[in-house]
Structures are given as C-alpha cells and as structure tokens.
Amino acid sequence: MTDSRLSLIPLPRSTSAFELTRLVGQESAPLELDGSSARLFVRQTIEVVDGHCQTESYSYRLQADESLGSWLVRWEYHRAPPRRDYPYPLAHLHVNATFEGGEPASRLHIPTRRVPLELVIWHLVAEGWVRPRIEGWRALLEEAIQGFDARRRAD
Amino acid sequence: MIGSMTVDETPAGTLVVDFTESEYDAYLEGEVQRGAGLSVAEFVQAYEAGQLDDADPAVSDLVGLLRIGQNGDRAA
C-alpha cells in the first residue's frame, strides 16, 4: 500500500521505550498511500514491559494531503491520562466534520476501544483510500488483528 | 547516516534509527515547534496548565510524543 517506511526510534534516555513513526530526514512525515493523494500519519510510543511491547500512545491520522490541516479522521490513545483533569476517553476518534446546524463535530472525542494500526489500514483499503498490493490483504490484516486481540487478553 | 545518527534495519524490514541524546532533543524541539509553535518546555508547561486545546490535531500527538503523564499512575 506504500513505499513509505516506518522507523523505530529507541529513546536515548530509556532502555525500554521506543517511538514508531515515518522519518524523512529528521522530521516525522505521513505515509504516502498507493493510488491516492491522501496520507496516513502514524506515531506510536511503546514501552517494553516484562518482555512484551505495550503501546503507551498512538496517533493515526488520515489526511487529504501532506498538511496537518487537511486531516479527515484521527484515532488517538493514551495509556494513562496525560493530565489529572483530562476528561476524555483515553482511546477516541475525531472526525473532521460539521453538524447540520454548523457546529464543528471535530472537537468531539468519540470513544473507541484501542484500535490496532492494521484495523485502520483495513478501513483505508475498504473505503478506497489506498490500493492494496496483494490479493490476500484481508487475511494478512485479520491475522495481525487476532494477534493484537490475543496480546490484549494477555495484558 | 546523518551526523552521528545511525540507521539499521530489522529482519522484518523496519528501519531502526538511533539518535544521540542531543539529536533526539533537537528532533523533539523540531516536532513541537512545527506542530504547536512552542518549545518543548513551553509546550509541557502550557499543556499541564490546561492552556492547550485537547481537540487540536497537533496537541494530542505531541502529548503522546513527549510522554506527558505516562510515567505516573496507569489508567485502570
């Protein structure tokens, strides 16, 4: 679905924390998507706890183009509330839309369960945002999502 | 290789980018400046004081990047 590659960045002052994102030079950048001018920004922070990877936060952002301002849908998650008075569900979705009366819907933190990146990719393929490169994309993603669910049950 | 940053690759093809401490600090400063127009210190202070908008597309991402609140109590 893309030639863009994610980079794993070990955090220099930690022996167990990592960031995963696409780097272009020394800046993060969204992934290019085959057959589309849309982009997918991906950032995860990960902590290795007792030998397995624990997602500390993620930010998955579908954009119409390279620019942050063109965002369409955002899936976000923090493992712990970032502030004591943080009122929102820790896993949530934003949609860049407007209600019929003109109120922005984009400010809503719509609750979700934790969403694996593979499920976001499934959404992008199914809705035509990106062209898959292999016929068996669905089975591949299903297998990865089953692994995600199994790891969550083991948490 | 750029400066002393090194790039390796896992058998699965994921790039592994090793920054030095100063390179990573510069990377964080660049990301926060680009996303919010603030320094890291200014961003953390403003966020913890409730002065930044949690609905802003850059804010939640940068809060995650800076791991704000993630070293305290875990959510239930």
Image (cartoon, grey):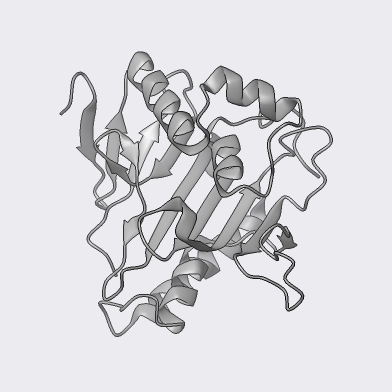
Tell me what residue is drawn at x 27 percent, y 71 percent: A34
Tag count in the figure?
0
**Can residue A50 be seen from the camera position used here?**
no
Which residue is nearer to you in this view: A109 or B76?
A109
Tell me what residue is drawn at x 42 percent, y 54 percent: A41
Q: Position of residue B41 (x, y in %)?
A: 57, 18
Which residue is the extreme one toward the left? B1
Vertical placement of A131 versus A78: above or below?
A: below
Vertical placement of A58 versus A33: above or below?
A: above
Tell me what residue is drawn at x 68 percent, y 35 percent: B52
Tell me what residue is drawn at x 33 percent, y 49 percent: A6
* Left or right for B36, reference A131: right
**Can residue B39 be seen from the camera position used here?**
yes
User: Image quarter for residue B73?
Assistant: top right
Which residue is nearer to you in this view: B10 or A129?
A129
Q: Position of residue A107 (x, y in %)?
A: 70, 57
Q: Position of residue A133 (x, y in %)?
A: 25, 77
Which residue is the extreme one toward the top? B22
Indicate the quadrant containing the N terminus of chain A: top left, top right, bottom left or bottom right: bottom left
Q: Position of residue A4 (x, y in %)?
A: 26, 56
